[in-house]
Structure formats: structure tokens, C-alpha cells
């Protein structure tokens, strides 16, 4: 079966199932040392000043306006 033969709804459901299968194995996702360092840096930055950053709605507007 070709994915394009599925309805949009069926493809969305397939994508959700695929994502859920990835999440169930998230402990198997290996990060590089640099990725871990960057994630720790970002978390520390957030914990220091939780006012930094942008709301999801602001980020979404910026992304959509770039299209």
C-alpha cells in the first residue's frame, strides 16, 4: 500500500502511531555530548530567568510569517 492512497485522516493517525512508537523508546535515543551540554545550558538559562523566551503563540506567528 502506498501512503498517498490513505486519506488525510488515516495518514494523520499513522503519523500519531509512529510518533507514539518513538516516544515509547525515548530511552533508546542517544544524544551526543554536545547535545547534552546544549540542553543543560538551555535548561539552566530557563531556570535562572523564566521570563526569557517566547510563548508558543509568538513562535507560531513568526514561523508562519516566514512562509
Image (cartoon, grey):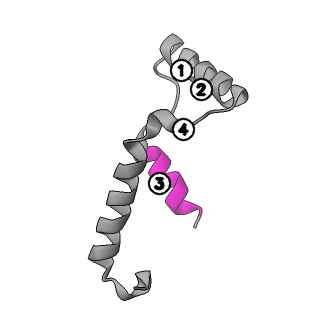
Marks 1 and 3, how far apart at CA: 24 Å
x%, y% of residue 11? 35, 73
Whether residue 4 is visible here, answered yes or no, is: yes
C-alpha span from label 1 to label 4? 19 Å
Left or right: 9 in relation to 33:
left
Labels 1 and 4: the sequence-earlier one: 4
Can see residue 54? no
User: Does the residue at mark 1 contact the one at mark 3 (Cβ under 8 Å)?
Assistant: no
Q: Is residue 30 above or below residue 1?
A: above
Q: How many marks?
A: 4
* Labels 2 and 1 touching (C-beta < 8 A): yes
Q: Position of residue 67 (x, y in %)?
A: 57, 67
Side (left or right) of 36 relative to 10: right
Q: Secondary structure at mark 1?
A: helix
Q: Which mark is residue 43?
A: 1
Label 4: which secondary element: loop
**In front of the other: 54 or 34:** 34
Q: Which residues are magenta?
A: 57-66
Tell me if 17 is positioned left or right of 44 in this view. Answer: left
Question: Real-space Cα distance between discs 2 and 1?
Answer: 6 Å
Q: Which residue is mark 4?
A: 29
Quick check: 34 above or below 4?
above
Rendered image: mark on residue 61: 3
Residue name at image x 53 percent, y 53 percent: 62
Amino acid at each position: 500500500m502506498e501512503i498517498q492512497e490513505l486519506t488525510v485522516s488515516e495518514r494523520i493517525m499513522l503519523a500519531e502511531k509512529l510518533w507514539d512508537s518513538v516516544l515509547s523508546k525515548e530511552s533508546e535515543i542517544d544524544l551526543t555530548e554536545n547535545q547534552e551540554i546544549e540542553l543543560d545550558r538551555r535548561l539552566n538559562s530557563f531556570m535562572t530567568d523564566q521570563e526569557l523566551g517566547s510563548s508558543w503563540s509568538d513562535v507560531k506567528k513568526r514561523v508562519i510569517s516566514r512562509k
